[in-house]
Amino acid sequence: MEKETKIHQGAITERYYIAKEEDSEEKEKVMEAIISKQASVRIFSTNLVYLMKEKGVLPGQLATAINVSPHRVSQWLAGNCYPKISMLITLCNYFEFYDIYKLVTEEFD
């Protein structure tokens, strides 16, 4: 995976600091990646709230059901982060929603 395509916030930010003095095109790519990640986290958070309401499950119940800490679920709901792909799969299975891409890219109605 190339540095420009890393989605880890720290790696993107670090690359931004390197790029800001070097190349404005590189800087733009990094900023787009940061904005895209932030949007995905926000969309995931919104969609998780929707799925939980549809299923009638509380954050603590979800945490227990998928074997994560309640704090982790709270972080997702607050839009601070989103889970690794393996946990996204677990969440999709739990909610019987099988489109991981849509879960992090499109807000549900």
Image: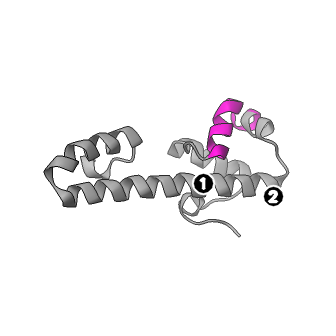
Q: Is residue 92 magenta?
A: no
- Magenta: predominant secondary structure element? helix
Residue 68 seen from this side = no
Dot 2 amino acid type: Glu
Residue most extreme to the front: 21
Magenta segment, which residues?
64-78
| Mark 1 vs 2, N-terminal side | 1
Q: Position of residue 78 (x, y in %)?
A: 64, 44
- Vertical relation: 58 (above or below) 98: above
Residue in the image at 54% along x and 51% along y: 41
Q: Position of residue 2 (x, y in %)?
A: 24, 49
Quarter of the image where the C terminus is located: bottom right
**Residue that numbered label 2 is attached to:** 54
The crowd level at tag 1 (other Cα within 10 Å; few <14, some 14-19, many 20+) is many
Location of residue 14 (image quadrant): top left
Badge 1 vs badge 2, beta-carbon distance below 8 Å:
no
Point out which mark residue 2 bears: none
Q: Residue at x 49, y 53 (%)?
A: 38
Checking the image for residue 44, the label placed there is 1
Residue that lies at the very extreme toward the bottom in this rendered image = 109
At a point 34% along the width and 55% down the height, the residue shown is 31
Q: Give the side of residue 57 with respect to residue 108, left or right.
A: right
Closest to the observer, 55 or 14? 14
Q: Residue at x 80, y 37 (%)?
A: 61
Residue 37, above or below 72: below
Residue 22 seen in the figure? yes
